[in-house]
Amino acid sequence: MNFFKVIRWMVWKDLVSEIRNRENISSMFFFAFAVILIFSFSFSMDARSSRELMPGIIWVAFGFTGIIGLGKSFLPEVQNDCMEYLQMAPVSKGAIYLGKFAGNVLFLLAVEIILFPLFILFFNLDVLDKLPMVLLIFLLATIGLSALGTLFSALTVQIRAREVMFPILLLPLAVPVFIGAVESTRGALNGDPLALYGHWLELLAIFDMIFMIVAFWLFEFILDE
Amino acid sequence: MIASIFIAKLRKYQNGFALLSLLFLSAGLYTGLVVSPPDYYQGEVVRIMYIHVPFAEAAMAAYTVLFAGSLWYLWKREPVIDNMCHAAAGIGILFTSVALITGSIWAKPTWNTWWTWDPRLVSFAILLLILIGYLMLRSFLDDPEKEARYSAVLVIIGFVDLPIVHFSVEWWRTLHQPLSISTRGVSIASSMLYPLSFMSIGLYLLLAYLIMVRTQMLYLEHLLEAKQGRLLSEVHSS
Amino acid sequence: MKTFYLRWGGILVLGALIGFLGWQRYDREVKTSTPEEVLRQPSDKPVRIQGRIEAGSLAIDPSTHAAVFNLTGTGGKIAVRYAGDDLESLRELKVVVLSGKWDPSARLFESRKMALTPNYGFVVSAYLIGLIPMAFFLFRMERKVALLYALIKQEKLYQPEDQHEIE
């Protein structure tokens, strides 16, 4: 099977199983919804402080949601004893990684796009003209988070303390993603000119590229029997 | 076979490292605490530099050893190299925490704060978290081969990540906190250079010695476990 | 095992020696007295005193490059005439360290040199935190390695193939 076909099949398989049981997306969505609710009670926000805090709140919510979703991304394979088959499959391990990674990006991005209107609604954001830029930021940050998260999910999925270990490993290493995402989201929501926060987008893009390549290469060593 | 040669080499050279490191460290401590004059601006507190900076350098060296060892392990799959990585991580935690604590102690009298979001401080805190995560990951994996492989992967990711963390925090900091207290540019007089370089060399050597000893310890622990396991299975089969 | 303890004894002696030398230097060059101590035991030798400049007592004379003020400690106070660098850095209520001599006839402390307030506790704690856990860690580790070698030698029932590695 050729490389891209493997990726397509991996994404297809995850999509179908997700559409059938809706386990992952719904748990991510309701978790993030709860986080937003708690935040709206924790800070009494006027327009100014809302502009200050909003990017941070968005990315804390998305980050935790990502942990819930990404951490489980290899769980179905383990539960259904498919890990061995993935290991033995005569295809490029990197393609399996990229397939899983693409699926994760799709799921996480879907949840983010469903949730963002709730932010607009609850916190009275005025974003319509900034939407394309915000979506670009979401895409870049989600790719970075998923590139690391997919790899760490494969690392931790078979150990006892999976729920604890996954965020412990992911969060410190994802610091650049969070900084870049929060700063560029702040710039975009404030309506600043791109020149003011463009370097954060570059940082996110560079992070994405580096970790997609590194994780692609390292995944071979994880799925090694 | 490689393992036994490796361990024999460690055992042969370790005493030389220990002796040299002891020499350099005592020279460093003597010049640092007794001979060198106090700094014009910082006074006596500058002496903390002679222990803080070498510890920070040695902590990074420990992580570099860990990184190189992890690459080596993934390439050759030699268990004794994994023992070395495991050893370097444990010692790295010790060095990194000492660097962070002494840095904090140095920051208090000079900048009047225990902690600041300086890029280097944040990178070191992240380094500490990576190393702790590394040891935790190891402790949760049961199969030794898988433990070695997975943890090596983690180390490589962390090694690539640390410079990016450093740069992103640097950018972030220039945005949010104007650099009121400069963390750079402590100009170094020649009288400070002696204690600093003695301590640095001494701690690099001590790091090497510590890794050598700890590698042997972990290797022997595994060997003993394997032996006792074999003994047990012999008892059971007879 | 005997050489092991001997070695660590040597390290301990070396550490104590450096500690002693450091303490001597501290006593000679860093330690400060309070104004009361200078008043109680006047001596001809130069001393360093640490105290707070009393509010309202500071008078700087730019023509002679000298300042006159009272230095207060925990109980008493002492009159000081300071003629040295950094006159402008003197402020009321500031804690300063001055080295100089007590002049009993004029009942005045003559000083020409100001030093930074020594916070030597930070230095000592940094070194102790750096070195003691390290030494303790290494001690435990070396002892364990020695023990493990001994234990492996004892396991006579089964010798590994690569036996020559263990002395």
Image (spheres, rainbow, N blue to C red):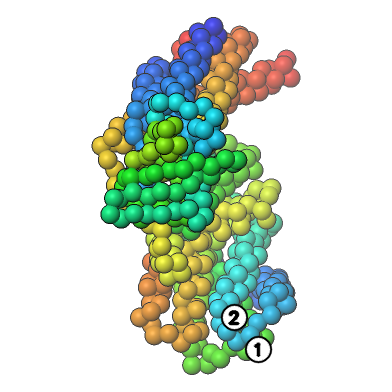
**Quadrant of the frame with the C terminus of chain A:** top right
| Side (left or right) of A69 relative to A6 | right
Residue in the picture at 69% in, 48% down:
A160
Q: Are marks 2 and 1 on the same chain?
A: yes
| Side (left or right) of A157 relative to C103 | right
Is residue C42 among what the camera can see?
yes
Circle 2 chain = A
* The quarter of the displayed image where residue C116 is located: top left
Q: Which residue is mark 2?
A: A49
Q: Secondary structure at mark 2?
A: helix
x and y percentages locating residue A166 in the rendered image:
61, 55
Residue in the picture at 47% in, 73% down:
A183
Amino acid type, label 2: Ser
Amino acid type, label 1: Leu
The tag on residue B229 is none
* Looking at the image, residue C140 lies above or below residue C71: above
The tag on residue A121 is 1
* The quarter of the displayed image where residue A194 is located: bottom left
